[in-house]
Image (cartoon, coloured by chain):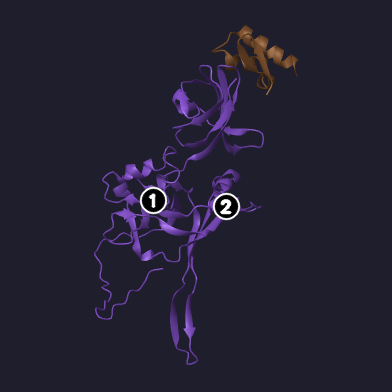
Chain colours: A brown, B purple
Amino acid sequence: MKVLEIGKEKWNADALCKMTEDEAIRKLSKNYTPDQIRNAWKQANKKK
Amino acid sequence: MGQIICSCENPKFPNLGRPNCVIEQRAIAFPILVPRYKADGITRNTVDVTDPNIGVVIQALLLASVDAESRIYPFPRCENVTFERTDDVYDTAASSTKFLVPFVGGVRTMKAENWAKNAVHAMLREFKKIGCTDVDMYLVDVAGSLWGIKDDINDTLMRGYAVSTETFVAFKEWATDTTVMKLMSSWDFDRTECEENSYAITAGELGYKATTLRANQQAYTDSEALTTLTAEVKVYTGFGTAGVRGKVIGLVDANFVLSVAGVPFAATAVETSDGEYTLTYAIQVGTVDVAVVNATGFDVTGSDFVAL
């Protein structure tokens, strides 16, 4: 599993790559802001 | 088969009178499989026929929360249920006088068919689980009575008919231009089973028709950590198409039990799309075990993920 470290948070880059940006925001909005999620999603997809 | 116990000093002869009202066994609607012994390998699975709440007790045995080796597993409604019996064996002398060879032959084979929706491949995959562990079977007749065996008239515990598990077979019958898909199964009863010891718990005594007893669906989970504080758990069944699995929807916080090394921790669950749940929790270290509990109508196999 590819892991992104952004600040203190770790993100599962492989899982983020399988989602659309909207899907990632929908699934993670309880704990993160849309901007945080967008940033992580873009970084995950850059690493593809 | 039953034994004829001869006592020459105290011979017995049949009293074949009967009362006006008796309980007939009707055509069998479906069997209910039950592991022969509980997890201890010693205690036979039975039902207490004197329990005033027998109907509720039997319904409770369906729940996935009951230990797998104490639970009951109804079949779907069956078609064309038959009970064939092999011929008895006789030793015939040259004079043509025949002598029955007792306890040889007379083997009972039960055959059942499941048609159409009850015969889909996901069901056949479940049937393939039968055969490793010894089982008994209760029988539900079309009148809604639940039939089993009491080895003695004074017994308060009723068990299922003992099945010769080694003879169980289930296979697919393909659909044709004039027939639907079928699932064919058969098994022998244990050769020592005494059918004359059949007893019924009637629909009236249960408080419902036993034909209403329904099995759980098998379900599965895939889980993975998404972030340090969240994981996604997908809960699905073996039904559906090659690309789209059946979904288990409507689960809530209380249905998910997350733990590390056997120690549970709190998590909240949000269903973000059908059958897909985002779980949120405090930071964890190590492998997280995911169990789905109390999902009515489902027996869910858990999974695990490595926390981020």
In this rendering, position of residue B132 left or right of residue B35:
right
* Chain assignment, label 2: B
Residue at the bottom extreme? B95
The reply to whether residue B250 is in sight is: no
Residue sitting nearer the eye, B299 or B291 = B291
Residue B247 lies, in percent from the top left, at 56, 31
Q: Quarter holding the C terminus of chain B?
A: top right
Residue at 45%, 66% in the rendered image: B191
| Residue at image mark 1 | B45
Residue at 29%, 49% in the rendered image: B205
Above/below status of A6 relative to B109: above
Q: How many numbered callouts?
A: 2
Distance, label 1 to label 2, CA atoms, is 27 Å
Say what secondary structure mark 2 lies in.
Answer: strand
Q: Nearer the viewer, mark 1 or mark 2?
A: 1
Circle 2 packing at 10 Å, graded few (<14), some (14-19), many (20+), is: many
* Chain assignment, label 1: B
Tag of residue B77 = none
Residue sitting nearer the eye, A41 or B239 = A41
Residue at 46%, 32% in the rendered image: B295
| Residue at image mark 2 | B183
Residue B71: name its quadrant. top left
Residue B86 lies, in percent from the top left, at 50, 71
Amino acid type, residue under disc 2 in the picture: Leu
Residue B28 lies, in percent from the top left, at 43, 56
Amino acid type, residue under disc 1 in the picture: Asn
Residue B178 lies, in percent from the top left, at 63, 53
Say what secondary structure mark 1 lies in.
Answer: loop
